[in-house]
Amino acid sequence: MFKLFKVLPCGDRAFLLQFGGSISFTTSQHVQRMFHALKTRKRPGIIEFVPNYCSLLVFYDPLTADLESFLGEVRETEKEVGQWATGKVKKVNIPVIYGGEFGPDLDFVANHHALPPEEVIRLHTKPVYTNCMYGFDPGYILLLGLPRRLETPRMDNPRLSIPEGTVGIGGAQTGIYPFDRSGGWRLIGRTPLRMFDLHRNPPVFVNIGDRVTFYRIDRDRYDQILERVKHGDEPISTYIES
Amino acid sequence: MTNPSQLISNHEPKGETEIFSVQQPGLMTTVQDRGRFLYQWMGMPISGALDQYAYRVGNILLMQDENHACLEMTYLGPQLKVLSNTQIVVTGADVAPKWNGKPIPMWTAIALHAGDDLTIGSARSGCRAYLCVRGGIDVPQIMGSRSTNLRLKTGGFQGRVLRSGDQLSSLPCKESIEKADCQSLPGDFIPNYPSSVVVRVIPGPQKNYFDKREGIKTFLGSTYKVSAEANREGFRLDGPSVEIKKGMKKSIPSEACPPGGVQIRPNGKPIILLNDLGGGGYAKIATILSSDLPKVAQLKPGDQIIFKEVSLSEAHRVLREEENKMNRLKKLLGFPR
C-alpha cells in the first residue's frame, strides 16, 4: 500500500519515515499502525518513535544502530500492517462544557459559519475522531475528523494564556490544550478531565489511533467531575469504552 | 507497562545530603540532566542541558556517572551557602566562580566544606554554565529524568527556577571524595565561546521547500543574529529572509523534530528549535549537528551565526570523533571502565 516511504534525515540522530505528504485519514492510520508495530520490539541503538500526521520520527544512536537492517525491518513491517484490521483501538468519550467563559470563541465560530451556536455544538459532538498524534505538549491530542463545516482559521494573534482542558478548533484540527499555555486555536469549550496526569498510569489515556468523541455536559456536571478530578477520585475508566 | 512509581521516583530518604542553601538564585538556574527520553510520542519534550558537552565533561571531571543532574545557570549564576562537604565542577560559560571570595578555576574539580560560600558570577564569554556536584543534584526523577521544563512546570526543583531560600541536596556517591580532587581539564578539551560561530548543518527534511539558488543560497550565504527571543524552547534569528519556493505552503503538518532543527517561519526568518519544544509546523531547511549544538547553546542575543552544510556521513564522522575524544578524556583522567 505505502511501499515507497521516504527516509528523510533530521540531523545526525533522527530521521523521518515519511508515508505521505498531506494530512489524510489513510496516511495517518498507516503511521499509527507502523508506530504500534515497530515499538513492540527493542533494537540496539533504535531509541524511540514519535508519530506525526504523515510520518514517524525515529531517534537512533549512530554509534550503535544498524540502520540498514532496521530499514529492512520497516519494509517487512509495512507488508504486515497493510493487512491489519482497524487494530487494537479503544473509544474515549470526553465530557465538555461548551460556550460561555469556557468556550469564549463559540459565538465567533458560529458567526464565521453562519450557524447557530447550538448547531456548532451538535456538529462538534457528532463525529468519532481519531487521535493521530500528540502536539508538542504532553497530553496534547491532535484529532482528525472535524466536520468541514466547522473548519475555522486560527487567530492572527495567539492568546497568551489558555486554561488547561480547553477544547479548540485550529483549521481542520480539533483537540484539547492539556496545560495552561499560549495558542491560536478558537476556543469552544472545556473538559474537566486531565489529559496528562503524572499520578496516572500511563499519564495519558488516549493512545495513538484511539477513537475520541465529545459529549456535552452542563455546569453542575462540570463542577462535579472537576471536583472529583482534583481529589484524584474520578476513575478515567468511566470515560473509556473497550 | 510502567507503574506510576516508576514515572515519579518515590522520594524517601536514601542517604541524600543537603549541600546548598540558595542565597541568590541567579537569573535563571534550573536542574538539568541528559534529558527525558521515550515519552516524546505523548508530547513530552526531552529538555536536558542545552550544552551537553559542558554538562558531560563536568560529571566526568568528578569521576562519576555522566547522567547525574546538574544546575544549568544562564548569564548570571547563583550565590550558594555550602551545607556539607562536597565536591563541585563549574563548566561551560566563563562565569568567574568564587570560593569564599577567592577566584577558583573553571573546568576543575574542587572540594567544598560546610560553611563555605560559592558565588557564581556573570558570563564573561558564552551564556550557559553548569555546576556539577558529587553524586548529582537530588530531585525526584520524573519519567526517567531530573530535567526541568519551565513551560510545563515539570521536573527539576518543583518544576521551576531556583529561588532564594531553596535547599538543594545531592545523592550519595560511592567513590571516595579524594579521588577527583583538583582534577582539571587538559586545555585542548576546553572550548572557546566566541560571539560569532560557524555551525554545521545537514539539509532538513523539507529542503525541497527551498530553491538551491534562492532560499538555500540565502540561508547558507548569510550571517544571522540571535534575537532577543531566545530561550530553551528555541532561538529566533534575525537576518535575510529565506525564500520559500513558489507554490509551496508556508506551513507543514505538525511534525516532531530533534533539538537543532531549523524552521523557516512564514516571514522567512529562521528559528532553531531546542530541547524544551518537541517540534513545530513550519518547513525545516536544515538540522544542526548534535556536536555543534553546544556552540549554539552558548550564544546570546546579538551573537552571530553562519550555517555551513555538510553531509550526513560527515556528521556521523564528527560525532564518532567527539565520542573518541570523550573516551580519550576518561582514559587521561583514569576514569573507571
Image: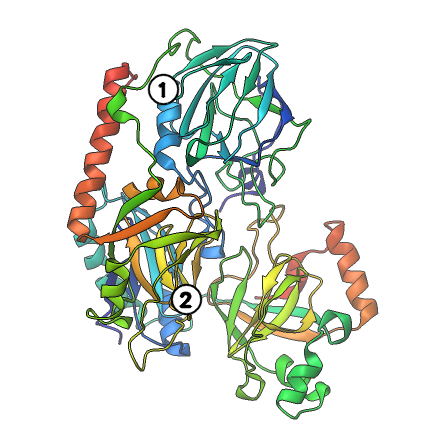
**Front-lying residue, A128 or B337:** B337
Q: Residue at x 43, y 43 (%)?
A: B300
Residue B26 position (above or below residue B310):
above
Mark 1 or mark 2, which has the lower sequence index?
Answer: 1
Amino acid at pointer 1: Leu
- Is B311 on the left-hand or right-hand side of A152? left
Image quadrant holding the C terminus of chain A, namely: bottom right
Secondary element under disc 2, as helix, strand or loop, is loop
The residue wearing badge 2 is B265
**Which residue corresponds to the image point at 58% horizontal and 70% vertical from the top-left?**
A157
SS for callout 1: helix
Q: Nearer the viewer, residue A141 or B244?
A: B244
Q: Is residue A203 left or right of residue B198?
A: right
Query: Where does the image place residue A142, in percent across and percent down from the top left?
Result: 51, 68
Q: Are marks 1 and 2 on the same chain?
A: yes
Circle nearer the viewer, 1 or 2: 2
**Residue at the disc numbered 1:** B61
Q: Is residue A115 above or below residue B240?
A: below
**Tag 2: Cα neighbours inside 10 Å, few (<14), some, or many (≥20)?**
some
